[in-house]
Amino acid sequence: MDVDEFLALHRTAIDQIEKGHRSVARSALPYEVTGRAASLLESRAGGPVAWPSGHTLPCDPQGNPMIFVMQIDLSALPPLPDFPRKGLLQLFVTHDIAERGITFSPDQFEAGFFPLAHGDGFRLEYHRDTKGLAETPYQIPAAEHPVAEQVFAETPVKLAIWDSVRQPPPFNNWHAEALSTQLEALINDTPDAPDYYDIVEAFGLPDLGTTIGGYAQPMQLDQRSFFPEYQSYDRLLLGLWEFDGFDVPSLAMHILINTPDLKEARFDQTIMIADAD
C-alpha cells in the first residue's frame, strides 16, 4: 500500500487529524544568519557584546566568559503574541554546550544533560532599555572542542528575520502527541501500511528552519513528552541550529518558556531542550 492509497482509505479520519493539527497553528518568525555586518543593537549573531558599562559579562561556574551567540532586537520584530515589543534579548552559552549529553529516555537523564535549566549551559539576558549599552569585547575561552573561535566574538553578523507565518506543531513536537497517536493507531490497524514518516510528509508541513516563536522542531524527539515537569514550558522562544561560526554539529536546540513568564518578560525562567539527527 502506498501513501495515496492509505490516505484515501482513511480520508475522513485523516481530514479530522489535519483539521485538528492546523487549528493549533502558531505565528512564527523564520530567521537566518546572513553574511552582512551588523551594528551594535541590531538582531545579530556574534561580535562584541552590547553590555552596560562597567558590569561583568556572564560567566560559567568556573569563571570563564560565556560565549555570546546572538541577540534579538524585540522592537524590530513583526508582532508575535505575548512577546515584548521593546528591548534586547541576548543568548549566551558555555563553551561545552555541544558536549552535553542528550536525554532520549527518562532513565537516561544525568545532571548537565539536556534538557537544561536557565543558568546551566545557557543564559538569556534581557535589556528592557538599551540606553547605556556599550560595545564590550571579550575573549572566548580556549577549549578542546570549541563551539566558536575568537573571530566569532569580533565579527557581528546580521540576522535576517522574515515575516510571520502560521506553523502547525511538527508531529515529533509534544504539542502534537495526541494527533500523532491517532495517526499511529490508523497505521497499526492497516495491513501493509506505509511508513509513519512518509505519511507525515504527505501532510505538507512547512519546513521553517530556525524560528523565533512558533513551535520547537526537534529532529527526533521532544523531551517534554517524558518529563511532565517541563510541559508547562509551552512556548518556543528561540530555535537554534549550527551556523557559520557557531559549531554545534547536528544539534538542534530550542529555548522554551511558559506563557505567564513570556508575558512578563521573565526570561530567566526558561529551559533548553535539544536532540540530534
Image (cartoon, rainbow, N blue to C red):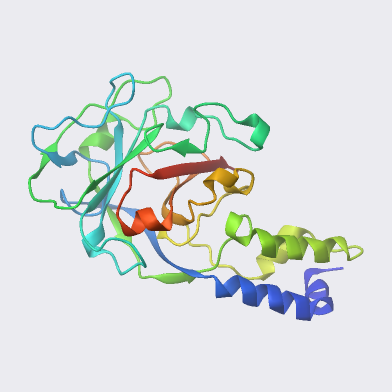
Horizontal and vertical percent for residue 210? 44, 55
Relative to 106, 33 lies left or right = left
Which is more toward the observer, 4 or 179? 179
Horizontal and vertical percent for residue 107? 67, 31
164 lies above or below 36: below
Relative to 133, 69 lies left or right = right
Q: In the image, what residue occupies the spot 82% across and 72% down?
A: 6
Horizontal and vertical percent for residue 273? 50, 43
Number of numbered discs: 0
47 lies above or below 37: above
Tell me which corner region of the image, top left, top right, bottom left or bottom right, holds residue 197.
bottom right
122 lies above or below 42: above
Residue 69 visible in the snapshot: yes
Q: Quadrant of the C terminus?
A: top right
Tell me which corner region of the image, top left, top right, bottom left or bottom right, holds residue 148.
top left
Q: Quadrant of the N terminus?
A: bottom right
Q: In the image, what residue occupies the spot 30% across and 69% down?
A: 78
Which is more toward the observer, 265 or 80? 265
Residue 210 visible in the snapshot: no
Q: In the image, what residue occupies the spot 37% across and 67% down?
A: 81
Which is more toward the observer, 272 or 217? 272
Horizontal and vertical percent for residue 180? 70, 61
Tell me which corner region of the image, top left, top right, bottom left or bottom right, holds residue 125.
top left
277 lies above or below 62: below
